[in-house]
Amino acid sequence: MSFGQGGPSWGPGDSRTPDWAALAEASAARGRRRKWLFIGGGALATAAVAAIVATAVITTDGGGASGPQKNASELPAPADLPSESAPGPSFSSVAPPPPPAPKDYIADEKKDTSPVTVDAFFPGRKLTMGDRVYAKGATTRTTGCATVTQGALGPILENNGCDQVIRATYSKDGIAVTVGLAVFGTEAQAKKAAQQASGGIASLSGSGVPTFCRGGAVCRRTANSYGRYAYFTVGGHISGKNVTTADKAVYAVGDDLTDFAFRQIRHRGEVQASAAAGAPVT
């Protein structure tokens, strides 16, 4: 006797009795195959779900611990990124010229072109030096350099090329001092005249100051130079009293006037140098 596929069968020794041991073995084998199919199918399903979840995490706009993630389409284009080859600031390798030296503009008549006048060097009606105030007396300007000197100074000025002399007198407490500026063409001429100085500048009276340092009175005289200017002083007592080395007041007034003359000459150079520095380069 036989059944359809999967049914019982009998062996050749006893065609009427089923082989129960064989049937049990076959049933157990079929059970084992079904178990492995279920395990394999479950693993595949788990892998598929994990892949879907991973894809969702990558493509979502939600972020992890480091914040929101951007899709590749939201990143800046290459043209928007800073270029590493962008040029930096450039600087000229040529150093700027140094500012003009003020003394250059009073060392030579070719640069010292400002007008030479009494008011340019001796302005105002009085002179203040610290806490000392001096009254301004008479002033004069002449191209006859030798005519306003005493002793050997006249020939010395002329031999060195003196162009003109400007004088001004200041007084205080019975003491008067005359300052004389001799103008030359070059610094070398002025320096030589001051070094050779003998005699001195003639005192200038007037405008409230009587004659002083004349008629043999002993007075204090100085000679200096700066740039193309030689400057001289003569000072003493208005009363005609002779000056001695103990007359500190006469020396103090003379020193103030000498210092003032130097400052005025230097200031002249500073003004012209400053004007030249601000002028356009041609």
Image: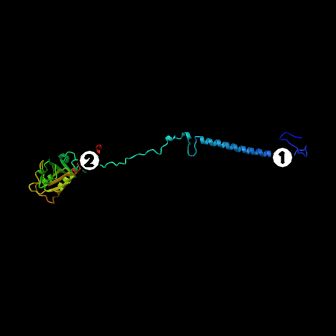
Q: Mark 1, residues whose alpha carbon is within 10 Å: few (<14), some, or many (≥20)?
A: few
Residue nearest the viewer, comparing 198 with 212: 198
Q: Quadrant of residue 11?
A: top right
Q: Are marks 1 and 2 in contact (CB under 8 Å)?
A: no
- Of the 4 image quadrants, the one containing the C terminus is top left
- Of the 4 image quadrants, the one containing the N terminus is top right
Left or right: residue 231 versus residue 74 is left
Task: Name which residue lies at 80% across and 46% down.
Answer: 29
Numbered mark located on residue 261 in the image = none
Q: Which residue is mark 1?
A: 24
- State which mark lies toward you, 1 or 2: 2
Whole-percent x and y of residue 259? 21, 53
Whole-percent x and y of residue 161? 16, 51
Q: Mark 2, residues whose alpha carbon is within 10 Å: few (<14), some, or many (≥20)?
A: many
Whole-angstrom CA distance, mark 1 to mark 2, is: 125 Å
Whole-percent x and y of residue 12? 90, 45
**Label 1 is placed on what type of residue?**
Ala
Left or right: residue 263 versus residue 204 is right
Task: Name which residue lies at 26% across and 47% down.
Answer: 273
Task: Name which residue lies at 25% across and 50% down.
Answer: 104
The local secondary structure at tag 1 comes to: helix
Whole-percent x and y of residue 179? 16, 51
Residue nearest the viewer, comparing 84 with 240: 84
**Label 2 is placed on what type of residue?**
Ala
Q: Which residue is mark 2?
A: 273
